[in-house]
Amino acid sequence: MPDVVVRPDGAAQIAEIMRLANRERIPVTPRGAGSGLSGGAVPVFGGILLSLERMNRILEIDTGNLVAVSSRCGDKRDQRGRQAARPLLCRLPMSLETCFIGGNVAENAGGGRAIKYGVTGRYVLGLEVVLPTGEIVELGGKRLKDVTGYDLLHLMVGSEGTLGIFTRIVLRLLPLPQPVRCCSSPSRTRPARLPSCRTSSPGRTSSPPPSSSWTTLRSAPLMT
C-alpha cells in the first residue's frame, strides 16, 4: 500500500513532486487506469502513488498531419469518440474499455490486434517526459522522420514508469480501413456472372456457404 496518494494535473506539478521525492529518497509509483496485467501500477515499495487520472484530455487531433496529441491519461474511449466523425484510426488495444493511453505507451501494449497493427510503440511520434530528478524533456514530435541522435523516444516506450512519467503523447493516426466487398456463386469455379454480393466491415468477416466460391472485388490497402 502507498503511504500517500497525490493527483497532479500537469507536468509542472509532477516535476515538483519528483524533485521532492528525489531529494527525500521516496519511492514513486505512477498509476493511470490500473488495467495492466504486469502489475506495474502496484506500489510494492510504498511511498507516493502518483495517480494521473486527472490528466485525461485530448489536446489536439491534427487531421492534416494524421497526428493526435494527448495528455498522459487521455482516455482511449474519448479518443475514439473524438475521431468518430473523422475517417481516422488510432490503434486500439484489447483493454480499450478500461485503459489510458499513458499506460499503453509505458507498457508498449499490444494484445491480439498487434498481429495486424503492431504494438503501441509503432504509433508513438513524441513524448513529454518528467524525469525522476524533476526535469521536463521533450522527445520527438510531429515528424515521421526523426533520426538525429540517440533514439531516447523508444527507450522510454515500454519502460513501465521506471525512466520517467509521460505527460504528453503524440500519436500517429491512420485512415480507417475501407469495407471489403465479396460476391458469392453456387459454383466452386469462377463464375461468369456473380449473382449476389455482400459487404463486410474491417475486422468482421463471415464464412462463405459451403457450395459457394467467394471473389474479392475490392479491398482498400491496409497497413502492412
Image (tube, grey):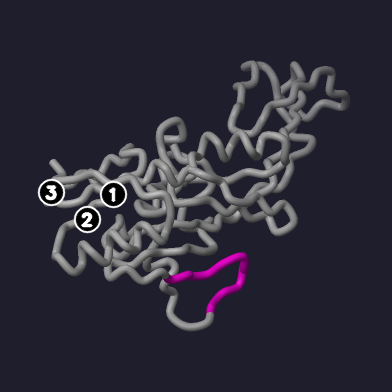
Q: Which residue is mark 1?
A: 50
- 3D distance between C-alphas at marks 2 and 1: 7 Å
Q: Residue at x 57, y 54 (%)?
A: 69
Residue range in magenta is 137-147
In the rendered image, residue 179, in percent from the top left (x then y), is placed at 72, 33
- Neighbor class of circle 2 (other Cα within 10 Å; few <14, some 14-19, many 20+) is many
In the rendered image, residue 34, in percent from the top left (x then y), is placed at 31, 39
- Neighbor class of circle 3 (other Cα within 10 Å; few <14, some 14-19, many 20+) is some
Amino acid type, mark 3: Gly
Q: Which disc number belongs to residue 46?
A: 3
Amino acid type, mark 1: Leu
**Snapshot quadrant of residue 87:** top right
Q: Which disc number belongs to residue 209?
A: none
Which of disc 1 and disc 2 is earlier in sequence?
Answer: 2
Q: Which disc number belongs to residue 28?
A: 2
Determine if the magenta segment contains residue 139.
yes
Helix, strand or loop for disc 1: strand
Front-most of residues 147 and 78: 78
